[in-house]
Image: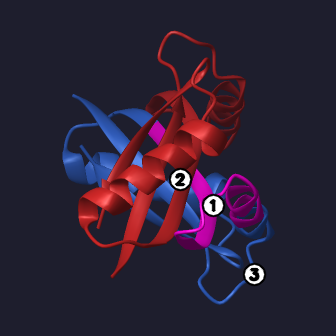
Chain colours: A red, B blue
């Protein structure tokens, strides 16, 4: 079966996120002042051929660990649709 | 009130996604062959001060339209948590 798997990769909470800070500054320059914090990460959609949703999740977690997320600086969440 | 708003920005379905193709090649090199397609976008978390969830959503949509998403090439989805 074919599964759509979504992986969210975000910078760890305790680390600075310079990209988020830049976006926050850009929003302030645009007059959007209601935003007090921004964090920017990656969203990856995988199309996985697997026998079960659990197998698809396991493939995606392996992909995230080995290639997509740097676990020193980022954490990831896998959602199987 | 403070709302956590998530914005998912993905390349439009009809457009090539060279970053996704590069990830797909990388996964194949790692021996992860169950993945047949990859698309890579951005995931942005905003902390928004607003009077209601609707107001927070509206701020996030304005931010996405004006700064975070290029609607010629990308579409976005806003989720208020």
Element marked by disc 2: strand
Q: Residue at x 69, y 65 (%)?
A: B24
Q: Are callouts 1 and 2 both on one chain?
A: no
The first of marks 3 and 1 along the sequence is 3
Residue A22: x and y in percent read: 72, 30
- Callout 3–callout 1 Cβ contact below 8 Å: no
Q: Residue at x 63, y 53 (%)?
A: B68
In the displayed structure, B11 sits above or below B6; it is below
Q: Identify the magenta region.
A: B23-45
Q: Tell me the crowding category of disc 2: few under 14, some 14 to 19, or many 20 or more residues within 10 angstroms, Cα based.
A: many
Quadrant of the image occupied by residue B11: bottom right
Tell me the distance, in whole angstroms, between the alpha carbons under discs 1 and 2.
6 Å
Element marked by disc 1: strand
Q: Residue at x 37, y 48 (%)?
A: A78
Tell me the distance, in whole angstroms, between the alpha carbons under discs 3 and 1.
11 Å
Q: Is residue B26 left or right of residue B1?
A: right
- Callout 1–callout 2 Cβ contact below 8 Å: yes
Q: Residue at x 58, y 66 (%)?
A: B10
Q: Tell me the crowding category of disc 3: few under 14, some 14 to 19, or many 20 or more residues within 10 angstroms, Cα based.
A: few
Residue B37: x and y in percent read: 59, 75
Residue that carries the numbered disc 1 in the rendered image: B40
């Amino acid at each position: 079966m074919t599964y759509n798997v979504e992986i969210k990769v975000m910078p760890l909470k305790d680390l600075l996120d310079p990209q988020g800070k830049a976006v926050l500054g850009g929003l302030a320059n645009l007059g959007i002042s209601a935003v007090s914090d921004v964090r920017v990460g990656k969203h990856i959609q995988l199309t996985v051929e697997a026998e079960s949703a659990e197998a698809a999740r396991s493939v995606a977690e392996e992909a995230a660990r080995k290639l997509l997320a740097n676990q020193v600086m980022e954490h990831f969440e896998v959602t199987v649709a």
